Image (cartoon, rainbow, N blue to C red):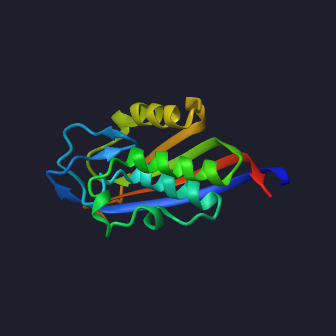
Amino acid sequence: MKEFQSQRIGYGEDAHALGAGRPLIIGGITIPDSPHGPVAHSDGDVLFHALADALLSAFALGDIGLYFPPSQAEFKGLDSLVIIERVWQLLLEQVSDFSVVNLAAVITLDQPKLGPQRSVIQANVAELLNLPLDRVGIGFKTSEGLSPQHIQARVSVLLRGHLRG
């Protein structure tokens, strides 16, 4: 089987409505003192969900709904780190060797302000992907009041690897 060096770009998005009394988890970090969190079948970590979709899209492998359908009770309350781990395993089965070169993410949320949590979220994602901090860009935006009961994340990744041909 022939193998070749390749670069791939992946893109993913995730969004959820917000509900009172739910934990707000972003990039595996629980945001303290948040008045609301995502209404979701899993833990609703929009950053990890968008990252999983970005990884899958880079290799045309669908999206997380294909592998973790919300209609299945076994995924209720699922920790999104498990989603990332399973997606990583799937990629290892499909691609002989790959690595993430860098990640760029933007999270849209009106409240609470996430700036104070940037370095913790960035460090957690960098550790997860085995990247230096300067290769993990995390940006925050508000909806400018257009959608205050909503959270969204968008992620782009650049991957390099040897693909089975």
Residue 49 image offset from top left, x and y in percent = 43, 54
In this orientation, which residue lies closer to the viewer: 91 or 52? 91
Where does residue 160 sit, x and y in percent of width and height? 72, 45
> Can residue 148 be seen in the rendering of this structure?
no
In the rendered structure, the answer to whether residue 64 lies left or right of residue 5 reads: left
Image position of 91 (left or right of 47): right
Q: Which quadrant of the rendered structure holds the C terminus?
A: bottom right
The answer to which of 125 and 144 lies nearer the viewer is: 125
Q: Residue furthest bottom?
A: 71
Q: Give the image quarter of residue 136.
A: top right
Residue drawn at point x = 42 percent, y = 60 percent: 14
Residue located farthest toward the right when viewing the structure as drawn: 2
Please tell me which residue is depicted at 25% across the width and 61% down the height of the picture.
149
Task: From the viewer's side, name the closer residue of 19 and 143.
Answer: 19
Find the residue positioned furthest to the front: 1
Number of numbered discs: 0
Whether residue 13 is visible to the viewer of this picture, yes or no, is yes
x and y, in percent, of residue 135 in the image: 60, 36
* Front residue (pair 59, 7): 59
- Horizontal side, residue 38 vs residue 89: left or right: left
Compared across the picture, whether 10 is left or right of 114 comes to right
x and y percent of residue 151 in the render? 33, 57
**Which image quadrant: the N terminus?**
bottom right
Eyeballing the image, is 92 above or below 38?
Answer: above
Quadrant in the rendering for residue 97: top right
Q: Residue at x 31, y 70 (%)?
A: 71
